[in-house]
Each structure stands twice: as C-alpha cells, then as structure tokens.
Amino acid sequence: MTDPLKLAGLTFTSRLFLGTGGIDSHVTLTEVIATSGTQLVTVAMRRVDPQATGSILDVIDAAGVTVLPNTAGCFTAEQAVRTAHLAREALDTPLIKLEVIGDEDTLLPDVVELLAAATRLVDDGFAVLPYTTDDSVLAARLADVGCAAVMPLAAPIGSGLGLQNPHNLALIRQTVDIPVICDAGIGTASDAAAAMELGIDAVLVASAVTRADRPPLMAAAMRDAVTAGRAAYRAGRIPARHHAVASSPTTGLAAL
Amino acid sequence: MTDPLKLAGLTFTSRLFLGTGGIDSHVTLTEVIATSGTQLVTVAMRRVDPQATGSILDVIDAAGVTVLPNTAGCFTAEQAVRTAHLAREALDTPLIKLEVIGDEDTLLPDVVELLAAATRLVDDGFAVLPYTTDDSVLAARLADVGCAAVMPLAAPIGSGLGLQNPHNLALIRQTVDIPVICDAGIGTASDAAAAMELGIDAVLVASAVTRADRPPLMAAAMRDAVTAGRAAYRAGRIPARHHAVASSPTTGLAAL
Amino acid sequence: MTDPLKLAGLTFTSRLFLGTGGIDSHVTLTEVIATSGTQLVTVAMRRVDPQATGSILDVIDAAGVTVLPNTAGCFTAEQAVRTAHLAREALDTPLIKLEVIGDEDTLLPDVVELLAAATRLVDDGFAVLPYTTDDSVLAARLADVGCAAVMPLAAPIGSGLGLQNPHNLALIRQTVDIPVICDAGIGTASDAAAAMELGIDAVLVASAVTRADRPPLMAAAMRDAVTAGRAAYRAGRIPARHHAVASSPTTGLAAL
Amino acid sequence: MTDPLKLAGLTFTSRLFLGTGGIDSHVTLTEVIATSGTQLVTVAMRRVDPQATGSILDVIDAAGVTVLPNTAGCFTAEQAVRTAHLAREALDTPLIKLEVIGDEDTLLPDVVELLAAATRLVDDGFAVLPYTTDDSVLAARLADVGCAAVMPLAAPIGSGLGLQNPHNLALIRQTVDIPVICDAGIGTASDAAAAMELGIDAVLVASAVTRADRPPLMAAAMRDAVTAGRAAYRAGRIPARHHAVASSPTTGLAAL
C-alpha cells in the first residue's frame, strides 16, 4: 500500500511539508519536525544567514530532512530570481519555492511577476515550486514553462481560513500533470484532510502548526490528517446525497 | 499523552466507533475492524439472530471488541424498549444504542418517542446511548434522565453530507456533562476530523466506511482522521482571520 | 402573477413578517412597518400592557397590520398556555405564535413542552404557530396535532447566522402541508432570499431589522429580498454545476 | 435615498447588468430587459452581425438601454483587441467588456493575456471592463493600467455556483478605487444579494436569467435581489454571533 510522492526527482513518503515562519525556538522546530513526520521543510532565505552556525538550517540538517529554500519577502521577479540564486549557492540545491508577493497586507502572490520569475528560474536550471493563486489557467501556464510543481493557496498566508475554494483546487489538479501542493491558509487538521481528499498531492503548513498553542501536538494532528485525507481519496468516498440511505435497511427486520 | 474516553464505565483508547450496516461480508467486517482500530461496534438487533452461529456477532466477538446493540428499525418507544431488553438478554450487556425512527425515508429520530424510551430504559438499568437530533435542549433532557451519552447526528443517516450544523454540535458539547458522540452523516475523513475538532468525544461511522469503494482503506482513513481531529482540538488551533498574518514577517529582511 | 399566502384563514400578499424585539422607539417601528411592507407583526405578550394607551399595540393598530401575539419568555407549556389565553382575551385574536424556551442563553425551543402546549392550544381553538427547531419529524407532529403553520428557526434567535441547515428547512417544506415560516437567525437580506428559495412560505425577522444601523432601510432590503427569493423559487433556477456552460457558446463564432 | 452608480462617465440607477448568452428569442430578451430594470446589456461581438437588421442589437436599442459589447470567444490578447476595435466601429461606443479566455472547458480568464489586452485598449482610448479572476493583486494591476472597472467572477461562467470565495471579492472591493462588478457564476437571487452585501457595485447575470425556467420572472427576482443586497449593505447588518441575543430580552417580563 505504498503511495510515494515523486517531486523534482525526489521521493517522499510523507505528504506533509512544513514551513518555519512563526516558530518560537529551535527546540520547538526539532520537536515539530519529529512529530509531523515531514521530510521537507521550507525556509525563507531572506531571513537566515547560511554562514552562521546554529541557524535554523542546522536544525533542519540535523533532522535529516530536505530543505526547500523560499523567496518569501520578494516583491518583484528580479528580487526573487536573485534570492533563488543566492539560495542555490548557499545550500547547494536546485529546489526553490518561488514566492513573489503582490501585496504587503495579504501576502497574496503577484501572478505576473511570478510567471516571469518562474520562466527565468526554469531556464537557469532550478526545480521551481511556485506559490500561486488558485487559478487553473495560470497553473497550466506555470506547468507549461517547466515548473516542478504548483503550490496554490487554500486561503491567504496565516489566515487559517481553510479551503476557501475547493472547486478551484480540484480544477488545478485536473488541469496539470505536475504535483499540486496546497500552500497557505490551512488552519487545522480537517482543512489538511479536506485538501488531500481533492486529490491534491501534498499540503504545506506553517502558521497552523507554529502558532498553535501546542505546536508539536498540532504537527502530529497534521501528519495524521494528511494521511487520512490521502487514504480517503484513494478509498473512494460515498456520494453525498440529500435523500438518506439507511446503513441498516428497514426491510427484512426481525419481528417484535 | 494518553487521552482515553470513559463511557458507561468502560475506557476506550480509540474514539472511532463503527456501525455494520451496509457491510458486504464478514471478511470485510473483520478487515474493517482491524484497520479502523475501533474498540466498539454497533449491531442492529432486529437484523441479527443471536442464536445463529457464524453471525456478525461472532465476527465482532472474534475481533475482541465491545459490541453495542442498537434498536435500528424501531419506530415507537414500545418497540425500542422491547428490542433493548431482547438485546440485553441475548448479549448480556447493559449497553444500548437507542434509535427510535420518526420517518422511514430520512430515518431521522422521533425525539418524543426517543425521550420516553430513554427514560424507561435508564429506569430498567440500561446504559443508554440515544441517537438524536442536534438539538441541545433535547440533549440536556436526555442527560437529565440519566443517559450515558448523547449521539447527535451530523446529517441524515447514509447521506454522507458531513457536518451540516457544527454550531449545534458544539452547543451540545457545551451543554451536557456526558460524552457526546457524533452519529450519522459523516461522509469522509475530513468530516470526522472536523467533528472531533469541535470537542466532540467520539465519532461513529457506518456507511462512510462500509459503502466506500475500499472499506478497509477508508476505515484506516477514519482512524487517522479521528486521531488528527482530537489532537488538533487539544493542540489549540490558530484563529481564522481575514487579515492575513505572514508566517514569515516582512520586517527584518536580509538586504538584496 | 398574484401569489398570496393563506395562513390561518387570512390572506397575505407580503411574505415578510416582523418581530418587534429590539426596536428602539415607536417612531422607528412605524417607519419599519411602512418600508417593510409587512402585513403581520408579532409582539411578546409578556412585555406589553394591553390596557395601557400608547403601547406598541397601538402603533401596530395604527399601521393597519395584523398583530400576532407571542409567548416569548415562557419556559413551560403551562406558562405558554396561560399567556396565550391572556393574549386572546386582550387582543381578541385566535392567532398565537407559540414560544416555549428551553434554554435562557440560546433561547432555543423546548420541543417537548412545545408539543404539549401546541396540543392544548389547538384544542382550545387557537390558530397555533409554533417556533420550533428545524426537525422535520417534530414539524410533522406539530402539523398532526393541528397547528396552523410551523415556524422553524434558521439559527438561534438574535444570532444573525443565517441558514445554518437549509437541508432541514427544505425537508420540513416537503414534509408538512401547512405553511412553513422561517423564524429566527436571519442576519441580512440574502439570508431571507435564500430561505424563500427553498420554497418556504414566509420569513419572520426581528433583530436583523430592529438592531441594524438603519432599521427602515434594512426593512426595505428584507421586503425586496423576500420578494426576490420567492420569485426565484417560482422562476426555476438553473442547476449548479462544476463544469461550466458558456452563456455564449464557443461554436459558431464570427471569424476574426 | 438615491444611490446611483457612476461607471465610465455614465450614471446608472440600476445595479443589475444583463448578458444575453443563452436567451431563446428576441421576445424573451425584450421581456427580460423590461422586468430586470437593467440599463446595460452586454453582447458578444463575435456572435452578432451589426449590419444585419433584426439582430439582438436592435432589440437592445429598442429597449433604450446601453449596449456593452464584449469579446467573448477570444483566446488571445490579439483577438480581443481586434474584436474590441470592430465593436467600437460598429456600435460607436468606447465601452468594451474584455474577455480573454484561457480554457475552453471552464471559460476561465487568462490573466496574462487579459492584462496585455487591457493595457493596449486603454491606450487606444477604450473604457475597459475586464472579466477577471477574483485575484485582488491582479485587480489592482488592471486598475493601475486604467481600466474603468473590474469584473471578477463569483464562479465559472454558466456554473450557477454562486459566491465561491466572498472573501476575495470583498478584498478586491477594498483594494481598488474603480467600480467592482461581479460577473459570472451567479445562480439565483440570493447569490446576487450576497454579492451586493459585500459592497460590490453591481452584478452581471446571464445564464441565471436566460436559462431559468421562466426568464422574465427570474429577471424580476434578480432586480429585487440586487436592490435588496445594496440596501442591506448600506443599512449596516447586525454582526453574526454564536451566542444568541434575545430580540425580546428575558428580563422585565410581566408576571404570570
């Protein structure tokens, strides 16, 4: 019953990815990585100093999981491309989670700059994972230029609103042939399960875990929720119907 | 990190209960019990012959889990009370899941007959677990007459509609001091997780597992979803907010 | 295109009923009745003195609309029955909106006491309109004992949460042959329209109008929303579908 | 209490716009325009022959309402720009509803081509109203290049799914200073009211009216729904709250 995720030439048995924004300490991060069972952690390159010892990168390294540098905090294609190159040099990885933010308040992506940056980074040999809106036409464009995956949002970063438009996420899954990773907006475990039930390939959570009252316990909840949602998707759920069907039919009852 | 459920003098480490309606074979039932990790399975007494060998009761017995007889198919308090007594004699258990159905099409409970039957069965020494609507005032009445738990529906039996009124389930949880078990209407894993996130004590599923394309896999999904939802509830989720909060704040960025 | 509502032997061309709880002055009430176009206003008998001049009853009388006394504030069948009789004597009307509250915090109905009171009041010759939960089995019982209508809630009184369980309201509409009036929980105009689109016969609003920033304007909004929802129901809406259908098909396009 | 909409130098007292796709006859169109009270009707230029007599354009002209040509059926900026120019020559209007479709099945917009076309058409002196996704960052870009309004979708064209992401529509309304017109996806009256309650400036419907069982009645429903939703927005709705507030408080009750 193995069901691995192949992404950018790598293979993952966990479909839960973790962001580190909002984490309160390296100790908590170590615990959270352990209880989540994640095999991939993303880090904002504009927030770490790869030269420094004892940084968040060391914690990730010690945990033995893959690091996914990201371009959080970049507002133009230019900035994002430059940050990606710095990340590749510092971390010796072709992987880049591409964020190009269009609005400081909502942190929503700027899809025009995003597509431009993605095109250039693919040309430069990166495995590009763009954080994008839930627009399936744009997702197809990102796939067309050679992205390794698309990472549509469920809701704005840090909002915890859950799946605001599951129809759009399902549409993206139907539209592209590359992995679809739900990024941003997950608030709690059932959101992560519901995302996976759409056939999405993986879920990335940050604030939902790092800012929960008990991050390690929420990380465990997310681990189980992602597993549950994936299994439910593969198990083939019953259709929802307004007219109830008795689980115990009323014909053939024993007489009283 | 143990978090057992105490119910009617028993202790359960699994918070997932299973109904057998719709199961296609004893083999599947055995598998489903195993992958679900459940410790309590409910059976419609009007559908089994406790004297017969090789019945569904033997399967449950062989699995080593608690059996919870139910009064499915009863339309009056009188019928339900009689069925409960037959169940106690046959199975030697004080537990009874009390169903008194008010409508053959929707299988929704008749709360007037339900309350009457519950009152009499408590008097007769049963540990009564009534299948009820999501009405918190009625739940308080059922608790007042001495029920061991209340089992409000998420949606009509077999509908798979999920949590139609989470507010009402949360209200019941706040109102009564006995266990609250979500019964009926769960369609898929995220529904079960979402129910547990309300603080509900356990979830019972039947059709969602037994009628799924792959029941054992869906049973495993439900196991993980219930665990995930419980952990998320205990972990203290982040609030949902329209104004996003960056998981990686935009102040203090490294210069580019 | 007339589409009158027949209720308790009366005929209404407006399907919007008004509650007075929360109104800040008699002047506002007069305005609100006028802009709402309502022909029926309900008043809590335990809050008015029918003997006093200048009471809310005079305002309703001056507006030329039907008064519907209600038993708000009653917690037992006994209290409600007594209040109904006092109302009939004072106002010389057989109409009674029957409220029997089961919980002081949520003001949710106590359906056991409600059914008992309804039965007695029907026997006593009243035209009984019970405020009830969204339970279709109970609604059928209320119809069976001879109620003139049922008034299920959309959500708790004063909550403004809107239709928490549209499926249940639709089920009540399919189940009983008497008018179904959505009572309590409406927050804004679209809620009222959505209720009417279910085939419900009328909507009663109180707080949503009386506690709005501008009650007369909200009353006008509710008037139009109820009209709109009723018309949409009768007009036969398009089905919702995930696969879009072009309103302008893409075949047969002019060449460019 | 006048509350006119100013758009592209024109003033409208009706905030309901109409699309003609799916209309079954010129007679129905005439009726629908009349009962809707609309003052603006959009027509797909690639579907009409402006030279022919007795075309849909004559019906709109006879009704005395503004015609808004659109570029439905265009899949590139190039096609859309050419269609817009043909429309301006034929109809002598600077108005253009700009559609650049990215996917034949869903008819979702291609935002990259859309922004390119919008930029060129603004330069060419058009009053551009782009049909767009519910992306507030893109809406800001469209406003920045000089569009006269933005027309985000509620859901895919013809789907009738209603407001799939009200949060995003509200965000667009907060972000741009030009009119926001909800375009596509409205299924019934309450959807239109709910859109207006977000503070959106106008709603455009096509299939929801033209494909309803009774288009003229649905057009009247939409007229009232838009009026209701706008009034509710301006009236200041009560907040939604889980803890009910009695519309008739329980203190100060008359004794029984």
Image (cartoon, coloured by chain):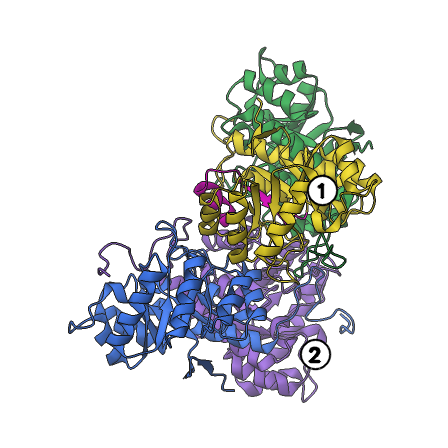
Chain colours: A purple, B blue, C yellow, D green
Q: What is the number of the mark on residue D200?
A: 1
Distance, label 2 to label 1, CA atoms, is 42 Å
Q: Amino acid at mark 1?
A: Ile
Task: Classify residue D216 by image quadrant.
Answer: top right
What residue occupies the far left of the structure in this picture? B53
Q: Amino acid at mark 2?
A: Val
- Percent position (x, y) of residue C48? 76, 47
The residue closer to the viewer here, D247 or B249, is D247
Give the chain of mark 2.
A
Task: Judge whether A19 appears above or below A100 on screen.
Answer: below
- Percent position (x, y) of residue C6? 56, 31
Task: Judge whether D220 appears above or below A234 on screen.
Answer: above
CA neighbours of label 1 inside 10 A, class few (<14), some (14 to 19), many (20+): many
Query: Which element is circle 2 on?
Result: loop
Residue segment shown in magenta:
C167-187
Task: Classify residue A28 by image quadrant.
Answer: bottom right
- Percent position (x, y) of residue A254? 22, 61
CA neighbours of label 2 inside 10 A, class few (<14), some (14 to 19), many (20+): some
Q: What is the number of the mark on residue A48?
A: 2
The residue closer to the viewer here, C2 or B32, is C2
Identify the residue at horizontal 57%, vertical 18% (top origin).
Answer: D49
Identify the residue at horizontal 83%, vertical 40% (top origin).
Answer: C53
- Identify the image quadrant of the N terminus of chain D: top right
Q: What is the number of the mark on residue B187?
A: none
* Residue D226 visible, this angle: no
- The verdict on residue C170 being magenta is yes
- Percent position (x, y) of residue B67? 31, 76
Give the chain of mark 1.
D
